[in-house]
Amino acid sequence: MIMRPLHSLDHVRKSFNGSTSRSVRSEIGQFLTPAVTAQFMSSMFESGPQHVRILDPGAGAGVLFAMCVETLISQKNRPLSIKVDAYETDDAILPHLEETMKRCQSLCTSGGIAFQGIVKNEDFVSVTIAEKREPLFALPIERFTHAILNPPYMKINSQTAMSRDLYSSDIEVANLYAVFVWLSMLLLEPGGQMVAITPRSFCNGPYFKKFRVAFLRTMSLKQIHIFGSRKKAFGDDDVLQENIIYHAIRGLLQKPKSVTISTSEGLDFGEARILSVPYSRVVHPGDRDMFIHLDVDDADTSPAERIKCFTSSLNKLGLTVSTGRVVDFRSREHLRQAPEQETVPLIYPCHFLNGFIEWPVESGKKPNAIMSSYKTSGLLVEAGFYVLTKRFSAKEQLRRIMAAVYDPTRIDACLVGFENHLNYFHKQESGLPADLAKGLALYLNSTIVDQYFRLFSGHTQVNATDLRKMPYPTHEQLIRIGTHLKERMPDQETIDAIIEKECLNCGQ
Ligand SMILES: C[S@@+](CC[C@H](N)C(=O)[O-])C[C@H]1O[C@@H](n2cnc3c(N)ncnc32)[C@H](O)[C@@H]1O
């Protein structure tokens, strides 16, 4: 039986959380990993070298490296020596970190394993970037065999010295967590392994593309763990964030054939559902954006498989999707609460009703109109049938993609402005044929599209780039689907039945 003497580290986490303010912890991105998660993460490492060097950047109270040490020494193939480098900048948590290091020391000593633990009260990012600049970094210095991390999450202010330093090191990324993963990856020796728990927002979208590409070129994914619930990954710490855990190995010549995808609702890792998915289904060969698809269904029922019956694309359809051009806070002087002479409709998400745009909305907080003048002409488009989708939606919502038709026969205007919280589908900046627009809106509102979208979307945004990557029905199929949309969007069951029928038809 495996002894778990370090499980009591959960008490440290609870008492530290109890004695510090959540808002202060939130400011420095300090959400400590529950011991059971740390244990699960450690179990992902493949048994490795005899001389282990572990990196834990942003170590907090040290639960991650401690569980890693504990797992390593309880294996049959125990290492001969373990070295740990733990970086941490928060003085308040340092005594706990020192204490954890001592406990690892005595655990190893009593097991006859040489141990060296170094607590580095330093900023991991600036230290590593400075090292990276040294010519020494290029030489074979002692790198890490293991990196285990739960890095701080926070946006990087582009005006800071850190942002400039990162930029000059060719590390361009929007959030600190990705910087930690990126730098840790560079500090691994070839064949070195990483296990990290981070938001899944890097799996798609333009903001993380550079990071994603660098990561997937350098590392080979072995396992990804998904949480069914957004709230449960950090147990009682009330973190509302879609997190994943991943295990990857630096520099395998060939990518593995498959990736293990495991799923648990929360911390019930023992109950996890485990699937082996071809690597090419997780990262599609030839995809320049290198989206990471988290397909958790069996091959026959998987949305990625089922949606293959739709073989067209926006390009083939001659359509484009763009983000609404009116950024309201930049155009304030041109906006009007109610329509006036010389104004045209301004459309926000609040104008969505039953699958169409309902305009104006008198009770709403948002302006209904924008002045039409030479100053705003670049923000407006000609009236026509457009399909609009909301740009922000949360995982808990019934559907992530919510589409509605802008029907020019319902709104008396020859120009229209779409606000920046919307994406709009158009044909070279003009409207679409009516039935095509209706078919497209109905398709986008279907469950199959929602399920497919959730496979790769890891944040609350529905970007135009994401929509460009979706498969679409052909022109004829969209026209046929469109004939089902009359005065209002049908209920979900009816939408799905219409789309299912089209899908079955194309197999014949
Ligand atoms: C999300 S917490 C995770 C702590 C610990 N790894 C765990 O899993 O419980 C991230 C930690 O990184 C620390 N941190 C933030 N910025 C840092 C930096 N630039 N260098 C080193 N540590 C940092 C925070 O103080 C915090 O303790």
Image (spheres, grey):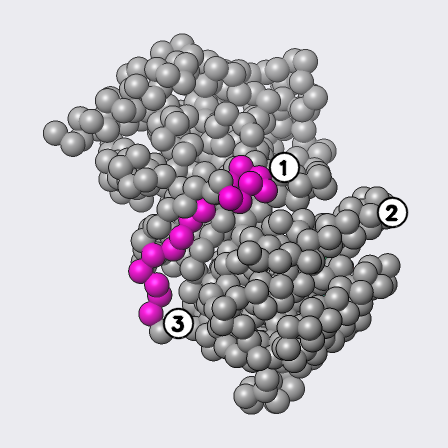
**Amino acid, disc 1:** Lys
Query: Which residue corresponds to mark 2?
Result: 19
Count neighbours of disc 2 (C-alpha within 10 A) and say few if under 14, some if 14 to 19, many if 20 or more: few
Question: Which contiguous range is marked in magenta?
Answer: 254-270
Most foreground residue, 159 or 106: 106
Residue at position x 56%, y 30% in the image: 396
Name the spot of residue 241 as percent of width and height, x first: 62, 42
Count neighbours of disc 1 (C-alpha within 10 A) and say few if under 14, some if 14 to 19, many if 20 or more: some
Q: Is residue 94 above or below residue 311?
A: below
Name the spot of residue 264 as percent of width and height, x first: 51, 40
Q: Is residue 467 above or below residue 176?
A: above
Chain-order first, disc 3 or disc 1 = 1
Assess whether mark 1 and mark 3 are in contact (beta carbons under 8 angstroms).
no
Mark 2 secondary-structure assignment: helix
Q: Splitting the image into 4 quarters, where does residue 273 fall?
A: top left
Name the spot of residue 223 as percent of width and height, x first: 45, 55
Residue at position x 67%, y 18% in the image: 364
Q: Splitting the image into 4 quarters, where does residue 186 fall?
A: bottom right
Mark 3 secondary-structure assignment: loop
Viewed as shown, does residue 374 lie left or right of 217? right
Query: Which residue corresponds to mark 1?
Result: 231
Count neighbours of disc 3 (C-alpha within 10 A) and say few if under 14, some if 14 to 19, many if 20 or more: some
Residue at position x 76%, y 59% in the image: 61
- Is 266 magenta? The answer is yes
**The furthest residue to the front:** 1
